[in-house]
Amino acid sequence: MDITILTPDKEVFQGKVVSVKVPGSGGQFQVLKNHAPIVSSLDHGFVNLVTAKGEYSYFNDETGTIETGEEAGREISFEIQGGFIEVLNNNISLLVRGLKNNLENGK
């Protein structure tokens, strides 16, 4: 699946993922391959994604630069204050606000 995560002023992540969990207004939910089309509002909470094989790019708040990676299975988590998600044909778009400066990269 392809995902793009945007704030009002920058793109914070773009690439391929195998899953993404989001804090939906009705509760947390996960998006996997071939998920039904959906548009949903997001509440305050954490967005957790797992990268797929292939290159991805993300905004590093500490350095103020766009960085790239290729590691499949990398877990990336960050906190948002709210926003929206759209899922259509294995393409995911997140428009988020209040992104904390704590982009965390796990193994």
Image (cartoon, rainbow, N blue to C red):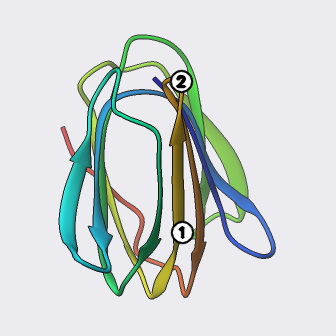
Q: Position of residue 57 (x, y in %)?
A: 61, 36
Q: Indicate the amino acid at tag 1.
A: Phe
Front residue (pair 46, 23): 23
Vertical position of residue 16 compared to residue 28: above or below: above
Give the SS element for disc 1: strand
Front residue (pair 50, 104): 50
Instruction: Give the position of the C terminus as an image quadrant.
Output: top left
Q: Residue furthest right?
A: 9
Q: Residue at x 45, y 23 (%)?
A: 1
Q: Position of residue 72 (x, y in %)?
A: 31, 18
- Whether residue 100 is visible here, answered yes or no, is no
Dividing the picture into quadrants, the one containing residue 11 is bottom right
Q: Residue at x 35, y 21 (%)?
A: 34
Q: Which mark is residue 15?
A: none
Q: Residues within 10 Å of mark 2 (few under 14, many from 20)?
A: few
Q: Residue at x 64, y 63 (%)?
A: 63
- Whether residue 28 is visible here, answered yes or no, is yes
Residue at the spot of label 2: 89
Give the Cα distance between marks 1 and 2: 17 Å
Front residue (pair 57, 15): 15
Q: Indicate the amino acid at tag 2.
A: Asn
In this rendering, would 88 be left or right of 107?
right
Q: Earlier in the sequence, mark 1 or mark 2?
A: 1
Q: Residues within 10 Å of mark 1 (few under 14, many from 20)?
A: some
Q: Position of residue 91 (x, y in %)?
A: 56, 31
Residue at the spot of label 1: 84
Q: Position of residue 47 (x, y in %)?
A: 33, 62
Give the SS element for disc 2: loop
In this rendering, would 70 be left or right of 44?
right
Dividing the picture into quadrants, the one containing residue 32 is top left
Front residue (pair 41, 52): 41
- The number of discs equals 2
